[in-house]
Amino acid sequence: MKTPLELLRSYLIENKLSAFIIPSNDPFFGEYIPDHYACRAWLSGFSGSAGTLVVTPSEAALWTDSRYFVRAEQEMTGRGITLMKLKVPGTPTLEEWLLARCPVDGLIGIDGMLFALPEYERLKKAIHPLLFSIEEDPFNILWKDRPALPNAPSFLLDERFTGASVSQKHRSVVEALSPDIDFIYPVMALDEIAWLLNMRGQDVAYNPVTVAFAAVTPRTIFLFMECKEVEHGKYKPIQLSEKACDTLQAQGVEFKPIHEFRRFLSSYPKEATRIIHQDRWPILLQLNVIESQELSFTPDPYRGGCISHLKAIKNKTEIEGFKLALKKDAVAWVRFWRYIEENLPLGFLTEQLLASKIAEFRAIDPDYRGESFFPILGYAKNGALPHYAMDPNGETPIKPHGFLLVDSGGHYFYGTTDTTRTFALGPLDEAQKRDFTAALKGTIGLSMAIFPSGTRGALLDILAREPVWAAGRSYLHGTGHGVGHYLNVHEGPMSIRMEENPVAIEPGMVLSNEPAIYVLGSYGIRIENMMLCVPYQENEQGTFYAFETLTRCPIDTAGIEVSLLGEEARQWLNNYHAKVYEDLAPLLTPQEAEWLKVKTQAI
């Protein structure tokens, strides 16, 4: 029996291709993908979330980042695949590697549904004079036991949680895009479809979304899902209840089978119609539409996408939901921290055990809907890896000294959470306290920001980094990302990071705040809160905004060197802890409340 790589190589030879590029994404360009699209893992054996595989008739190479160097080498052993370590000196780029191995007139195969326009155009220039051959998904033929597309039950989120109906959201999209012309607006991102339809599902790990496509027109939202035909030409999704289907239809939604999405776009009536497309528009879709009819293409006027922008600005109901979710989540964190303190001396705690424990404490609440991402629990030197992935099948012991970094989040009907806390498990030395204090000052510095309207995240980023830099430390990841409302824990279009992002921070946006310090081989420190952009004041100088911290989880003051904190930051922390105690004490047992009172006392 041929191996997966041998099957692909036979395909290359039959189709006169010099190579094939297999990315890690799916047609929805989400952070997590269904097993159906895990083609790179099927070919290589590498199970990490990030990596690009390139296969030629005689060689194969996989590019991934430092998070996965060790795992990739282990999982790809004996498969004849060379590991290419991104950002390591001497590692050729994917384009350089292809140019060195393929003939001048070589054709490079790609699945046209997995490459968005910007990346396709970039690669097209970089591999010149090589040419792309845009293919239909070859793995439908090559992968005989390929997992089917998921179709788990989905449901409609009540308006008491969303604060807006589907028809209201439809109107807001039409008004934002172009209320005066006919158009069709394809929607590929699963979280955007979930938001637009007030629909939540369980087709993708950690993201409460449903595998689907959508298309918005001024009159109708077309929803493409796995359907059953109820009468000639009339369909209903098999993942939704009859009541949910009737509710959506009453609000202007029309159902169609998911496999008809491409044909629908290419056959849509073209009189005075234009397609408004996002950057995440697969190259194959554009080619299909261009070949089948003459439509004018208009880029989405919103950086990052119209629906992405509307979704990012939370309404009053969603904001109140976030606040409730973060209180409920903080109760789980309090119980989790107490569990650590009570059991640490007994010597049986491991990273893996604690990862399951924090989920157990969340699950006590009946509104808990699952983890919002795979938890990061890094003890000692493991915490120095920003995106450390613990071995789910191993046991990594935790001892009563050093730091434990815990980054974890949950979904609730009314909001999604993302919190990081670093716990001091024993006495700390001077350097550890200095670093902990610097990282905390970074979190507080950004929390206290006041800024004029139009300010972008790159201009705020220094407020978090300056105390870290002043301590002679740095971190390379972003400082803040958007958080979805009972949706993806990472969402755009805004961000707070060193790299320029032209999207301004606006009231209603919910972002993380997570500066950090990592000392390779020793420890990691990250203190992450969620915060809401709110109006601050308006005067003759303009309109100003600020941040309101939403997180209610206490911060471990044992790591602080108070003499280095500064009076303003000390006062912020004391005020924060007073709010934490005030909000959480009524939700705790008397014993838990007394414990929290000690943890939140003023310093």
Image (spheres, rainbow, N blue to C red):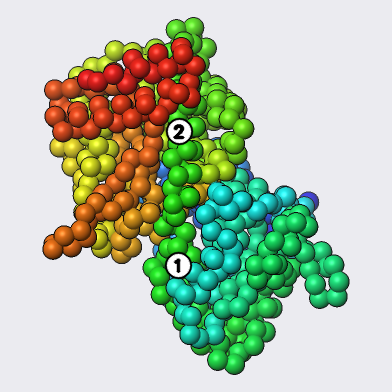
Q: Nearer the viewer, residue 120 or 46?
A: 120
Point out the tag, 2 or 1, that comes first from the N-terminus: 1
Label 2: state its secondary structure: helix
Q: Residue furthest right?
A: 231
Q: Nearer the viewer, residue 526 or 545?
A: 545
Confirm whether residue 95 shows in the render: no
Residue mark closest to the camera, 2 vs 1: 2
Left or right for 443, reference 194:
left
Q: Residue at x 47, y 80 (%)?
A: 178
Q: Residue furthest top?
A: 346
Q: Nearer the viewer, residue 493 or 169?
A: 169
Image coordinates of residue 140 in percent, x first then y, are 73, 62
Image coordinates of residue 121 in percent, x first then y, are 44, 74
Classed neighbour count for the residue bearing mark 1: other residues with Cα under 10 Å, few (<14), some (14–19), many (≥20) = many
Q: Nearer the viewer, residue 294 or 453?
A: 453
Above or below, 112 relative to 327: below
Q: CA distance from mark 2 to mark 1?
A: 31 Å
Q: Residue at x 18, y 62 (%)?
A: 542
Left or right for 318, reference 500:
right
Label 1: state its secondary structure: loop
| Contact, mark 2 vs mark 1 (Cβ under 8 Å) | no
Q: Amino acid at mark 1?
A: Gly
Q: Residue at x 13, y 22 (%)?
A: 563
Above or below, 76 relative to 273: above
Q: Amino acid at mark 2?
A: Lys
Above or below, 534 relative to 362: below
Quadrant position of the C terminus in the picture: top left
Image coordinates of residue 477 in percent, x first then y, are 34, 46
Image coordinates of residue 157 in percent, x first then y, are 61, 51
Q: Which residue is mark 1?
A: 305
Confirm whether residue 228 shows in the render: yes
Q: Which residue is mark 2?
A: 327
